[in-house]
Image (cartoon, rainbow, N blue to C red):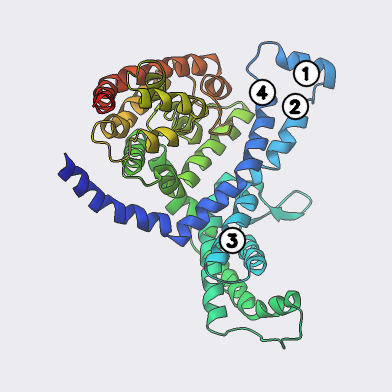
Amino acid sequence: MNQIVDWLQKRLNPIADKLNANIYLGAVRDGFFGATSILIIGSIFLLFGNLPISGYADFMSSIFGKNWSVFFTVPYDMTMNIMVIYVLIGMARSLAKSLDVDEIQSTILSFATLFILNPTILDKSQAEGIAVASIGSSGIFLSIVSTLITIKLFSVFIHHGWKIKMPSSVPDMVSNSFTALLPGAILMIFAVIIRILFSITPFATVQGFVLTIIQTPLLKIGSSYPATLIVEFLEALIFTFGLHGPSIINSVMGPIWLTLTAQNQAAFQAGHALPHIMNLQFDANYLKLGGTGTTIGLAILCLYFAKSKQVRTLGKLAIAPSIFNINEPLIFGLPIVLNPILMIPFALSPFIFISLSWLLTVIGWVPIANGTNIPFTTPPIIAGFLISGWQGAVWNIVEIFLPIAWYYPFFKIFDRDAQKQETN
């Protein structure tokens, strides 16, 4: 077993290290993490406008009038529906810092090039504007590609001296503006040329190209059962070698899952059928009760069934974080990391919980997650109710007991070994 562990560690650690250290993936991750709070707030407003409680809508109408829901939809529209703006700020600042260029100028140039590349629309009165959809979930991939390329080229121009140098006596605020003048002009000209070139293609716009060639295929893959199964298995497997699997995997999958969540949320708001079973909330609230590996059952076993004093003590420490889906005390405390007994059920748990949750959703026993972007620390049962009504809450209850049975045989072996060590 040690030879297998050593072999896997030797092969997987370098890959995980490269993904974790990649500044471009890191910038995307930072952008989404930075926007998380505002997106969650917007989602909660939408939830309050659509609580699955009988008579709730009539009650609100009697107090605030027939247009009462606008009080909740406006905050949602100004957060989730224009998420590109919030994500771009964090993404641009993170990459600019990594490439050692001015963060403010990098962010401004990123917005400028994105808006040039975005299609414009005309209303009946010939007023021109940018479609909200292009700065919402539909525009997320264009914003990622545009921002990463813009700041990378900006850093190349700056570090190669393609800039206007001001005397040292000039204040930094003024000097930075002039430093960005030449690179910014070049980048905006490039963006205009690209817009013109795409206007004569069948895609018509850069946004049309990205949606057709990049975003739609990625979303189809990311929303599929097989892809989710593979990704979740890799995330858990990486964690068993001491590397933070969610941080590594979410830098790639986070934008895809969040876009799927936003599309579900938009459909939920419009009263349409929800399009995606797999999304960010499915991942966080049906697959990770207690954290990656669905370890809430293992925490309960440690607390109530351990014969070893050290395991039982760790159970007392780990149960409260597990309720809020944080399981680092178990992963590094038992440990699960490089533990040839516990790493087996931990790494293989996604095959069980993804398959069961997916199957129950397909057959209609559990509704598709409605896209409410609740925090990943929302306790089970509450989380299930918020995203799928009472059926989601019931399934969360069942999921609390399932991992107890799943982990039990492996836990007993580990607990007996720990007890023997204490006795000796």
Q: From this viewpoint, which residue is outermost toward the bottom?
A: 167
- The mark that comes first in sequence, 3 or 2, is 2
Residue tagged 1: 60
Q: Are marks 4 and 3 in contact (CB under 8 Å)?
A: no
Residue tagged 3: 92
> For mark 4, does the 10 Å Cα neighbourhood hold few (<14), some (14 to 19), or many (20 or more) residues?
some
> For mark 3, does the 10 Å Cα neighbourhood hold few (<14), some (14 to 19), or many (20 or more) residues?
many
Residue 324, percent across and down?
A: 52, 28
Q: Is residue 222 visible?
A: yes
Foreground pick, 314 / 379? 314
Relative to 408, is 372 above or below?
A: below
Inter-mark Cα distance, 2 to 1:
8 Å
> For mark 2, does the 10 Å Cα neighbourhood hold few (<14), some (14 to 19), or many (20 or more) residues?
some
Residue tagged 4: 50
Q: Are marks 2 and 1 in contact (CB under 8 Å)?
A: yes
Q: Are marks 3 and 2 in contact (CB under 8 Å)?
A: no
Q: Are marks 2 and 4 in contact (CB under 8 Å)?
A: yes
Q: Secondary structure at mark 1?
A: helix
Instruction: Give the quadrant of the N terminus.
Output: top left
Residue type pointed to by label 4: Asn
Residue tagged 2: 69
> For mark 1, does the 10 Å Cα neighbourhood hold few (<14), some (14 to 19), or many (20 or more) residues?
some
Q: From this viewpoint, which residue is outermost toward the top?
A: 54
Q: Is residue 170 left or right of residue 35?
A: right
Relative to 344, is 123 above or below?
A: below
* Residue at image location 73% in from the left, 77% down from the top: 172
* Residue at image location 60% in from the left, 70% down from the top: 192
Q: Secondary structure at mark 2?
A: loop
- The mark that comes first in sequence, 1 or 3, is 1
